[in-house]
Amino acid sequence: MWIAGRRALRHYAVEPDEYSDNTLVISFPVHAPGQTRRKADVPLREKAELAAQMQHWLSDNQVSCTADSDPETEAGRMPEILAEYETRLKAIAFLPSGRKEYKQPPYEEITKQQYGRMVETLKPLEGELLHEFEDQFCDGAGCQVD
């Protein structure tokens, strides 16, 4: 696998973006020890509140938030949530959960077995590899990687 003309980053899964030319998607397996709730257990309003808190306390610009929701129980609440947070969020994307037609969702739940398979070949990102891309030119449209 290749990323912008270079070998894949330490065995992370890299694939062409299904929706954008000249773009790659990298899968990062994440395990959050001690978490008592899954993404599906967090209500849409709470996801919007968390994004608003990050926007206020942690960002000088827009935070990126794709809040998935249960289309059966939460779709009707989107207009009131947008109205409630219109002064606290610059943008938020709503995505119906459980839809299999999304080829590369921004976040997807995986099993312990899938996580184990993904991390067993990974190597730490350290040393020269971390500095390999730091001096590349980036602007709002993307990064130039030689």
Image (cartoon, rainbow, N blue to C red):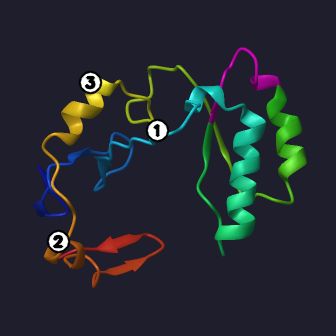
Quadrant of the image occupied by residue 2: bottom left
Q: Is residue 117 above or below residue 128?
A: above
Q: Nearer the viewer, residue 8 or 4?
A: 8
**At 20% across and 59% down in the image, what residue appears?**
124
Badge 1: residue crowd in 10 Å (few <14, some 14–19, many ≥20): few
Q: In terms of secondary structure, where does tag 3 sit?
A: helix
Q: Is residue 80 above or below residue 11?
A: above
Query: Mark 3 belongs to which amino acid?
Result: Gln
Q: In terms of secondary structure, where does tag 2 sit?
A: helix
Q: Residue furthest front?
A: 34
Q: Nearer the viewer, residue 91 or 46?
A: 46
Q: Quadrant of the C terminus?
A: bottom left
Are discs 1 and 2 less than 8 Å apart at CB?
A: no
* Mark-to-mark CA distance, 3 and 1: 17 Å
Are discs 3 and 2 less than 8 Å apart at CB?
A: no
Where residue 81 sits in the image (x, y, percent)?
84, 40
Q: Nearer the viewer, residue 71 or 19?
A: 71
**At 51% across and 20% down in the image, what residue appears?**
99
Badge 2: residue crowd in 10 Å (few <14, some 14–19, many ≥20): few
The tag on residue 107 is 1
Which residue in the protein does label 3 denote? Answer: 113
Kindly tell me whether residue 55 is visible in this rendering.
yes
Where residue 103 sits in the image (x, y, percent)?
38, 30
Are discs 3 and 1 less than 8 Å apart at CB?
A: no
Comparing labels 3 and 1, the label whose residue is closer to the camera: 3
Which residue in the protein does label 2 denote? Answer: 129
Query: Mark 1 belongs to which amino acid?
Result: Tyr
- The magenta region covers 68-76
Where residue 62 sits in the image (x, y, percent)?
65, 65
Quadrant of the image occupied by residue 105: top left
